[in-house]
Image (cartoon, rainbow, N blue to C red):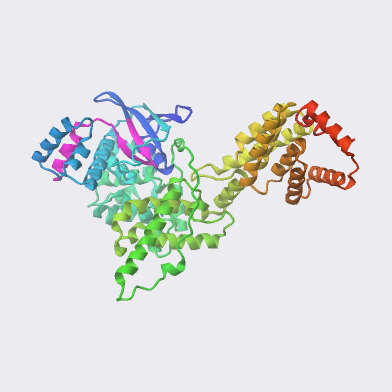
Amino acid sequence: MTGSTGGSRTYSLGSAAGSVSFPRLLFGLLRQRFTGTVSLTQREPAGERTIWVRGGMPVFCDWVSPEDRLGEMLVRDGAIDLAGLERGLAALAASNGKLLGQVLVDLQLIDEPTRTSALREQCTRRLVHVFARDGIAEQVTVTAVEHDKGKDDELGQINALALLLAGVEAHYDNSRIQAEMGTALSGDMVATPALARYQRQFGFNAADDSQILGALSRGTTMRSLMIPGIDRGRALRIAYTLWVAQMLRVGDDALQSIAKGATAAASTATSSSPVAAAPATPEPAAEPPPPAAPKPPVRPPPPPSSKSASKPPPSPAEPKRAKREDDETFERILVELEGRVSAEANAFAMFGLEPDADRKQIRAVWSELSKAYHPDALESTGRAPLRSRVEKVFAALSEAYGVLSKQEEREKLREALEMGGPIKAGEDTSAVVRNAFEAEMIARDADKLLSAKQWNRAAELFQKAHALSPQDSDIEAALHYSTFRASADGNDRQRAVQTITQLAGIIENAPACARAHYFTGLIQLGIDETTSAKHSFGDALRLNPRNIDAERQLRALRIRERSGSTSAAETKTKKDEKKKSGFGGLLGLFKKDS
């Protein structure tokens, strides 16, 4: 990476040291489920081009390639004839800005699925041209930004793994691969268990499956692959593709994986056990692009019950009804799982589990979901048309299990959730924990300033702490209170009511936040709402019995209630004095009773 600004990062695209190849960049976007744009320069014809990405997969590209015009593609594929294309082009000229695909649909020359498939193929062909870059360093800018392409339109997401193989096959020769992989080609190599999960998505042919992939799955060397019947160039391109996709271990890492049985062949042999077949979750070698802006978390639905998984087949008397109900359940849960993926739910939320779930619970949910939503299980249940949707969901489930199956990663995520609130998929949990710890240190200094009634300085520090840990309700409550005290004056009753409302919002989201109740009581006391203040102090003390200040305030209020010694005249005099000073004596609110 050569630089970054805001939500954008600039990379040097090429094969030289410090650069990142386009295949690696493409896989980095996929691993991060990136949403945004990739901007780069096309040489011939010259111009700036953009690739739009959603969820880590390209959805549109404005790369200029005359041979990939939609109309000619549809004719070559036999979807329309030349006469139909001419009719469509004539209608396009008078359509006032419509696109050719929509015009052809309007004329009923093609249907919408055909148009979507053609647009996806067109985008794939254009992107394959980008792989032709010959290693000369060029600048590419990756920008995390929300966009509408591929969201509610006819565009379809491109299978990034199939694109990766197609681009390498079209434009990577032996010398180019050797230059990038270097000494990795001279030692041992073995495919990781992840290949068993994602092999179908690459689109390998039968010869690849039986020879090259079979050898790589067990463990081999490139020299051992050089036997009659195996194309050396094809073997190099497959090895390079898997290496870029973090599904190929090389050198000592390969030997250790073979020794531990952590290979694609071992995973395939034990595929009856969903847990044993869980894919690895490696990080992309290149520095990842910035993640998409966080979206509000979606409350995960309960996983399918074991009862439904083992439900006996319907009786012959009502097969249609039973199948329809089963399909409806499958579709409903699939939609809810897609919601979790879109919301970038953390690993626990992806599985519908609380952060305190143990390994046994995690394995049980993974077993249920992986059996029901494995892409390869769709054919036998008549759900093959759902494959593209299920593949995305299953990839996210697999990644979530990759986190939860490792104790260290699981504990890090738990700690981050406890300290920093909701975590989205792929977020650096260590950074969340570090920020929360730093915020706590700053808040301690701010509390000292609060006790010393240095309101402005305290508010500044609480603001910094809140920026580091926005989910910490204690810090947020202290920020509102210190800001109120820093700005309050003798006529600031309206400001007091506004701050009480802000604190009420915190209490609604975090009912156990004792400090929010305590600060509310102090402000209520200042505007003569003593009954409400008494309840607030009582709630604060109930939630935190060690809150000595709340106990002291509550005791003082109860003593005043019991004494009842103040005469009506004295009470009226005090009220008049408060009116003269403004805001019921706010300036003396927090002085100790004499």
In the rendered view, does 3 fall on the left or right side of 313?
Answer: right
In this view, the residue farthest toward the left is 83
In this view, the residue farthest toward the top is 46
User: Is residue 558 or residue 592 the one in the foreground?
Assistant: 558
Which quadrant holds residue 173?
Answer: top left
* Place of residue 135 in the rendered image (x, y in percent of width and height, measured from the top left): 33, 30
* Place of residue 21 in the rendered image (x, y in percent of width and height, measured from the top left): 36, 34
Which quadrant holds residue 490?
Answer: top right
Does any portion of residue 199 appear in the rendered image? yes
In the rendered view, does 549 fall on the left or right side of 195?
Answer: right
* Place of residue 313 in the rendered image (x, y in percent of width and height, measured from the top left): 35, 73
In the rendered view, does 100 fall on the left or right side of 268?
Answer: left
Q: Within the magenta stretch, is there residue 53?
A: yes
Which residue does the image show at 26% across and 36% down from the upper left?
126
* Place of residue 285 in the rendered image (x, y in percent of width and height, measured from the top left): 44, 39
Which residue does the image show at 36% across and 54% down from the upper left?
390
Q: Is residue 489 above or below residue 524?
A: above
Task: Report the number of numbered marks.
Answer: 0
Magenta stretch, residue numbers: 50-78
User: Is residue 378 or residue 474 the one in the foreground?
Assistant: 474
Q: Within the magenta stretch, is there residue 43?
A: no
The quarter of the rendered structure image containing the C terminus is: top right
Q: Is residue 2 above or below residue 304?
A: above
In this view, the residue farthest toward the front is 569
Q: Is residue 494 above or below residue 274?
A: above
The quarter of the rendered structure image containing the N terminus is: top left
User: Is residue 574 or residue 589 the one in the foreground?
Assistant: 574
